[in-house]
Amino acid sequence: MSDATQPTQATEIAAAVRQVLGDSLGYLYPAALRVALRTDIAGHLTDGPKTAAQLAELTGVHAPSLHRVLRFLATRGIFREDTDSAFHLTPAAHVLRTDVPYSVRSTALLLTDEMYWKSTGRLEDTVRDGSTAFNDIFGAPLFDYLDQNEESARTFHTGIADLSAIEQGGIAASYDFPATGKIIDVGGGPGGFLRTVLANNPGLHGVLYEQDAVLQQHQLDDEAIAGRWETAEGNFFDVAPTGGDIYVLKRVLHDWSDDDSLRILQAVRKAMSDQARLLVVDAVVPPGNDPHPAKLYDVAMMTIFDGKERTEPEFKELLAAAGLRLVRVIPTPGTVSILEAVTA
Ligand SMILES: C[S@@+](CC[C@H](N)C(=O)[O-])C[C@H]1O[C@@H](n2cnc3c(N)ncnc32)[C@H](O)[C@@H]1O
């Protein structure tokens, strides 16, 4: 029996074998990236190229090992080695710097933190029985674990806030906010997105609804929005503040299972008047085989949170179950979309 997908040519077989073996060692890439992040190689290259020996001297690490890691990263476009063995910044290396507005350094430190890689190492358990690997390894669901582990909480919230800082301008500009009214950001983190929306829309007032520990780190003390915001502490599974014209759930629902997401949506639905709108801001999984960040993050979500990235029909169904109607899906310049919903 012949199968059209079976490689027959030696070159095809060699390419398939090379792909699978390369993918089998794919975990080396985030490990190497983490070394570069932790030693701040990008920061040390800001004032010009340096050899691995010079970088090792500056960072206090083993020079030959650092050279091998940087040579490997250069194969992925992070740093470039010249013929004099000096390493240079590349566009992908620049985003690892701390001193640029588009820095993903803290987000990459979060995504390569043991909270993520240890959980991903147990992906097979998650697939076999549907359990959340993080909970087994760390002894509690992620947000409960963060309550007890200050350093991990700092790593998590800084990584998420810095990711938000990069995308929030594009998201805020993608939606036509009303000239007046109240916006309530449910699970809004330290409030970077709310601050951006309020700064762009001087007639709006805002409420940052979060857990107490996160509210203590809020970023709303900004002259541009003075007197137009307040914070509210609470549990979004139980209740959401009333009186909002626009409710926002940005990068929240993907942390949770359908059952838990439904509880959050029901709490928000209960708080909404018939004129209010809900903006769910999350990645939407597209159909087809093409790569998309949502398909990547989706696999991480199942080992860490019992969460998931969703397709548009899945969002529509979830919203409908909470008494909400999906009106439209608005793309943003980043990986997330704005799903606008009204009361059904
Ligand atoms: C992935 S973060 C997203 C933060 C922010 N919306 C953003 O896009 O950057 C999820 C947020 O949900 C908050 N959260 C988790 N459980 C919560 C609860 N039970 N009640 C209120 N907020 C909660 C967390 O503190 C965290 O800031």
Image (tube, rainbow, N blue to C red):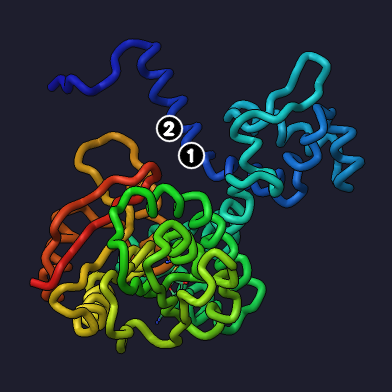
Q: Amino acid at mark 1?
A: Ser
In the image, residue 179 sits, relative to residue 220, either above or below, namely: above
In the image, which disc is placed on residue 24? 1
Identified at 15% across, 20% down, the residue is 2
Left or right: where does residue 81 sit relative to residue 218? right
- Is ligand 1 closer than 8 angstroms to the Cβ of mark 1? no
- Residue 38: x, y in percent? 73, 51
- Residue 262: x, y in percent? 22, 75
Identified at 38% across, 42% down, the residue is 333
Identified at 42% across, 61% down, the residue is 197
In the image, residue 1 sits, relative to residue 55, either above or below, namely: above
Q: Is residue 32 visible?
A: yes
Q: Secondary structure at mark 2?
A: helix
Q: Secondary structure at mark 1?
A: helix
In the image, which disc is placed on residue 20? 2
Q: Are marks 1 and 2 in contact (CB under 8 Å)?
A: yes
- Residue 225: x, y in percent? 51, 68
- Residue 28: x, y in percent? 59, 42
**Counting other residues with Cα less than 10 Å from the Cα at mark 2, is it few (<14), some (14-19), or many (20 or more)?**
few
Identified at 35% across, 82% down, the residue is 236
Left or right: where does residue 238 sit relative to residue 193? left
In the image, which disc is placed on residue 253? none
The CA distance from mark 1 to mark 2 is 6 Å
Left or right: where does residue 218 sit relative to residue 187? right
In the image, residue 140 sits, relative to residue 19, either above or below, namely: below
Q: Amino acid at mark 2?
A: Val
In the image, residue 137 sits, relative to residue 120, either above or below, namely: below
Question: Between 89 and 8, which is closer to the camera in this rendering?
Answer: 89
Quarter of the image with the N terminus is: top left
